[in-house]
Every structure is written in structure tokens, then in C-alpha cells.
Image (spheres, rainbow, N blue to C red):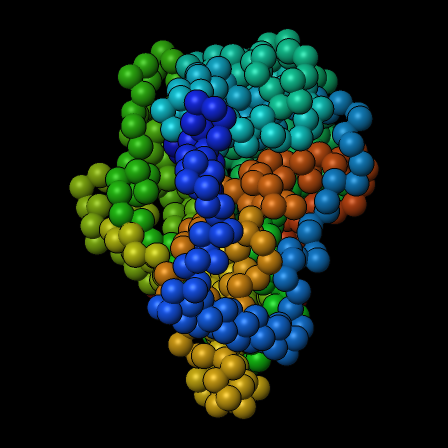
Amino acid sequence: MTDERKHDQPDPKSPDGQSPSSAEPARSGVSRRGALKALVSVPFFGAFAFSFGKKKAADDFRKKTILSELGVTEGGPAYIPNAISKPPSERVRLGIIGFGGEGESLVRHAGYAHPDWVAEQRKALEENPAAAGLAVYMGQEDLNVAFTAVCDVFDVRAQRAIAASAVDTKPGNGPANPPAKRYRHYRDLLQSGDVDAVIIATPDHWHAQMTQDAAAEGVHVYCEKCMTRTEEETRAVHGAVTNAGIVFQLGHQNRQSEAHNKAREVIEAGILGPITLVEGTTNRNSPWGAWVWDIHEDGNPQTIDWELFEGPAPNKVPFSLERFFRWRCWYDYGTGLAGDLLSHEYDGVNQILQLGIPKSCVASGGIYYFKDDGRDVPDVFQAVYEYPNRDLTFVYSATLANGYYRGLRFMGHDASMQVSGTLSVTADGESTRYKQKIEDRIIDPSRPMFTYRPGFKGIDAVTSATEEYFVSRGLLYTYRGGRRVSAYHLLIAEWLDVIRNGGQTSCNIDRGFEEAMTCHMATRSYLEGRKVEWDPVNRRIV
């Protein structure tokens, strides 16, 4: 099975160990503080300093006034999903099914980076001292897992997984792991007795059967999104996982994002007022972003088990390198823009608003740009979801031929909130709640009331037009206590912690059921060219 995805700096030191900036005033006999005092005594600079100090005092006053009015704290979110309850003492034996780009990334965030990746990161660090990849990896918590088993239908990737399992560069500098054992068929891996838990990072069409088979063997599952390929599979997976009682985690990294969890606090505080519209988007503008991935030079019928790759795919076709390496372009194996990208946006909204499955969906789109590669999934896609019981509409749109980023927006009567790796809230000019403060010029509706940027100190209640865009989406990194950390790592760590100590994962089987059904509603509406609705009694799309 397989998947394919591919500060401030200190002053340079002078020979005597001092920085040029500190050494120069000493030689001239004027201290830095004295030089600044002298500048302030000059009329222009003195007036500037007074003006700057006055503005800062005014900004501080506004900041305190706004935060007091909103009831917002400056620090990180009070709600952090399932923080690790205690150090991981019980070693968990981990298997991987599917060691493509995503599978390799997930195993790395569990503590096993391929030697080639480590070498690439070291080279990047030599060329750019600010390169953080290796530092973030080595700064991960040692999750105390043994990487014991791998299954992949492509020989090259299976061997790459074995090499990663025996890497000696690990977080916490733990002992080297014996090479993982390769299994040709995933069922042999699940029945081997060599694994306690498994990561499933295969094409979508295999997720359901593998998860059900793992549940039957009592093996805990971390599954990549979309959870299933079809509506029928979704009900079957939910039943199997629930009945078996295994720990299940769906791979949505936003569940560990500080910005998303802070957004939940903003909503619960009623800062936006009644929310009637939410917009989510995913735009890309590259062949890679449209899943036109590289075809490995060693891919051929001798190195790829094509029959096992196809497995439960509804339409069997002759061996095809394009379909193997670019499987997301076909509904036989994937779930299109709905399951691949809308799923992230929906799960973020569901995490923040707890919306559940919508009452109805209308979706449209088409293949408007990538017309020559044989795909049957659209490259432009829109879906409109209605939640009449919440007086709310969720609109999603995507194109694979334009990279303009618009973010995830929550629009209330009193304010709007944009969420990505950061969070900002802007008052509406016609707000009822903030009307007086807008008139008093304490709140300016033309710029954010406050911005929360994980990794920075506190909340900027007064922002400027030159404010930097720190993180675009927050799908890769987030922060804990001001420290940069992988959201993938946190999601895997949470899953392992629940396996050891009990509890619930943040993206458990119930959240997975909601995600899958919501995505399948959009796909079905698009393919059938009609509005679809959710029947909550029979739990079916009609």
C-alpha cells in the first residue's frame, strides 16, 4: 500500500568577544544609554520619542480595553486536546501500512526518520542556519515506540521503511531499533502478533477494509483522511471500531493547532455574535498540488504488486504507473477534492463549532484546467452545506489552478474571525455589540481587534498593516509553550497516550464518521448533479 506527497539573530562577534554594536560606544566613551538620551534631547528626536511613547500608551490602553471587553486571555488556549498525561513508559509496537510520502512523514513524526531525510536536513542547516527541520525533529518527545513491521506493495518503499526503522538519529537519542519486518500482505502484518498499533497511510479505497481487519485483531488504528471512500464503508468502519473498542485516531492535524483551539475559545465567548456564514477554501496552482506526482524510475510490474494495490477498487484496469503514483486523480482510489482537501477545512470548522453532519449539500465543479491526464476528479469544486438548526451555512470552494489563499473565515453579526496557523478577529462596522467603541475609536473595524500568533508573546490587540504573516495554514507546525512542534507529532503522541492510559482521541471514530459522511455528501451531490440530504434517523445520505 502506498501514498505519495511529497528571530532575531545576535550581532556578529568581534575578535574580543563583544558585538560591534556594544563595542563601538565603549571605544568612543559614550554608552548606548547615554547616546539614546542625547538623541532624545535633540528637538526632532525628542518629539518623536514623546509621540512614540504616547502612541504606545494609547495602544496599551486600547489593548487592555479590548481584551477586557472581550474576555480574551493573552496566553495560549486553555483547551489543549489530551495533553500527554504522563511520560510514555510502556513500549508500543508500531506497524505501518503504506510508506509513501505521507506514511514516511507520519513514521518520522513518531520518531523514525529515514537516513536520507536526516542527511538532507543537515545539509540544509549548513546552507541556512535558520533551517529548523532537524531541530524540530530532534526536539520531539521520545514516544517510546518500536517500529516493528511494514507493508507496502512497492518494493522500493518497503525497503525505505526498513531503513527508517533502524535509524540511529532519534529524538531523545534512544537506542537503535532492530530493522522492521516486511509483510507482503497487510493481513499477515495484522495477524503477526508483532504490532500493537498500526498507521494506515494507503490510498483511500483501502482505508475501510484495513481498519475493519485491524479492529478484528484488536490492533489500534491511526488512519489518514478521508476515513473511507464510500458512505457504506463509513457505517461499517464506525461499527467495527466501536464494537472492538480499539483506539482510533483520524489524521487531522488541526486538532492540535493552538490557533484552532484558541478559535474555539473565541466562539464560546460569543465575541463574533450570531454566526451565519463560514467559508473555507483550498487553492493550489502547481502540478504537484493537483496530484501530478513524479513516477519513480524503478516502478514497474516486477516491483509493484498491482493486483494487491487495486484490491477493493470498483473498476479494475491494466497496470498503470500513472494510476499507481497519481491515484488521487481517480475516484476508483481516492475521494477527490472533497475527501482530500475539503475534509481538512470541514474538520477545522467542526472542531471549532461542533456542527456535526449538515442537513443538506449542493456541490458543483468540473475538470477545467487539467484536461489531458485522464483524471475523473474535478480540479474546481464548490460545496454549500446548510445547518438550519444552527442558522448557518458553510461554503467551501477550491481550485487547483490558482494559488490565491483566502483562509477559513467565520462571519458573525458583530465580528469576523480568520483562522489558519494564526487567528485574527475584526469587528464589523455595523456591529451592535461594538457600536459605541467603534464610535469612540477604541475599535477600528478596518483592522483586526486582535491577532493571536502562536509562538509570539500574547495577543496583539492593536495590529498594523505591516503585520507579518507568520504561518499560512498551520497544517505542519504549531506551538506548545512557545516551542515550535509538529502537529503530526502531537496527534500521534495523543493517540499513543490514549492507547496507554485510556481516554478519547481528539479525532476519534465519531468525529471521523461526521467527516466522512459530510465529504461523501459533497461527492455524491457533484456526481449525481443534485441536492442531497442527511437522514439522521437511518444515518443515510438521501
Image position of 479 with respect to 184: above or below:
below
**Left or right for 207, reference 246:** left
Residue 351 in which image quadrant: bottom right
| Nearer-the-camera pick, 20 or 76 | 20
| Nearer-the-camera pick, 266 or 483 | 483
Q: Where is residue 145 in the image (x, y as percent from the top left)?
A: 69, 23
Visible in this render: residue 154? no
Q: What residue is shown at x 44% (from left), y 72% (from top)?
A: 51
Q: Position of residue 147 (x, y in %)?
A: 63, 19
Number of numbered discs: 0
**Left or right for 356, reference 120:** right
Visible in this render: residue 7? yes
Q: What residue is shown at x 58% (from left), y 54% (from top)?
A: 457
Q: Where is residue 7 in the image (x, y as percent from the top left)?
A: 47, 42
Image position of 242 with respect to 194: above or below:
below
Toward the left, the furthest residue is 372
**Left or right for 233, reference 336:** right
Residue 180 in which image quadrant: top right
**Left or right for 54, reference 295:** right
Q: Position of residue 524 (x, y in %)?
A: 42, 57
Image position of 163 with respect to 250: above or below:
above
